[in-house]
Image (cartoon, rainbow, N blue to C red):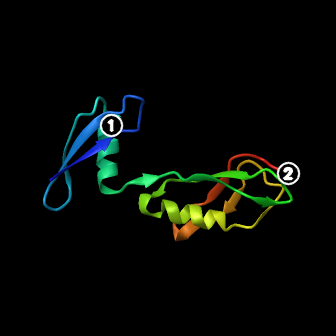
C-alpha cells in the first residue's frame, strides 16, 4: 500500500510516495529532495498535525484578535479548534502573546494572541 504526499517544508513542493507495511508502519519514502521532506512524509502519513490560525472578535474593539495554536494539533481536530475559538468571549485590551484559551478542545494546547489590540 502507498500514499502520495506533497511536501510543505520548503518551496520545492516535492511529491512523495510513502510505502506502508501491513501493520501501518512507513516502510519507504520516495521523491523527496531532502531529509526534511522524508521526515515530514513519515509524520504526515502516520499522524498529520496542523498549526491553527484565525481571528476572533473582542468586545470593546473593532479590530479582531488574531491567534495561533501554541503547538500543532491533530489535523482531525483543526476544525473543532477553529469552532471553539469562534465561540470565545474576549475583552480588549489583549497583548501579543496572551493566552486567550487554555487546553483548547482538551488537547493541552493553548491559543495565543498574535497581535495586541485595544
Are the residues flagged by discs 2 and 1 in contact, CB closer than 8 Å? no
- Residue occupied by mark 1: 37
Whichever of labels 2 and 1 marks the residue nearer the N terminus, that label is 1
Label 2 residue SS: loop
- Residue occupied by mark 2: 118
**Of labels 2 and 1, the one closer to you:** 2
Number of labels in the image equals: 2
Residue situated furthest front in the rendering: 62
Q: Is residue 28 visible?
A: yes
Vertical position of residue 109 compared to residue 8: above or below = below
> What residue lies at 79% left-to-right and 54% top-to-bottom?
94
Residue situated furthest bottom in the rendering: 106
Is 31 in front, or is 110? Answer: 31
Q: Is residue 108 visible?
A: no
How crowded is the residue under tag 1: few (<14 C-alpha within 10 Å), some, or many (20+)? many
Vertical position of residue 35 compared to residue 61: above or below = above
List x then y, in percent, for residue 67.
65, 52
Q: Is residue 36 left or right of residue 115?
A: left
Amino acid at each position: 500500500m502507498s500514499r502520495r504526499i506533497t511536501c510543505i517544508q520548503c518551496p520545492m513542493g516535492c511529491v512523495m510516495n510513502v510505502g506502508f507495511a501491513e501493520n501501518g508502519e512507513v516502510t519507504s519514502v520516495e521523491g523527496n529532495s531532502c531529509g526534511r521532506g522524508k521526515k515530514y512524509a513519515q509524520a504526515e502519513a502516520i499522524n498529520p498535525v496542523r498549526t491553527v490560525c484565525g481571528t476572533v472578535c473582542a468586545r470593546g474593539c473593532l479590530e479582531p484578535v488574531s491567534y495561533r495554536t501554541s503547538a500543532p494539533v491533530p489535523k482531525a481536530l483543526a476544525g473543532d479548534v477553529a469552532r471553539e475559538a469562534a465561540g470565545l468571549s474576549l475583552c480588549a485590551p489583549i497583548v501579543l502573546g496572551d493566552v486567550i484559551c487554555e487546553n483548547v478542545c482538551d488537547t493541552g494546547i493553548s491559543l495565543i494572541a498574535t497581535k495586541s489590540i485595544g
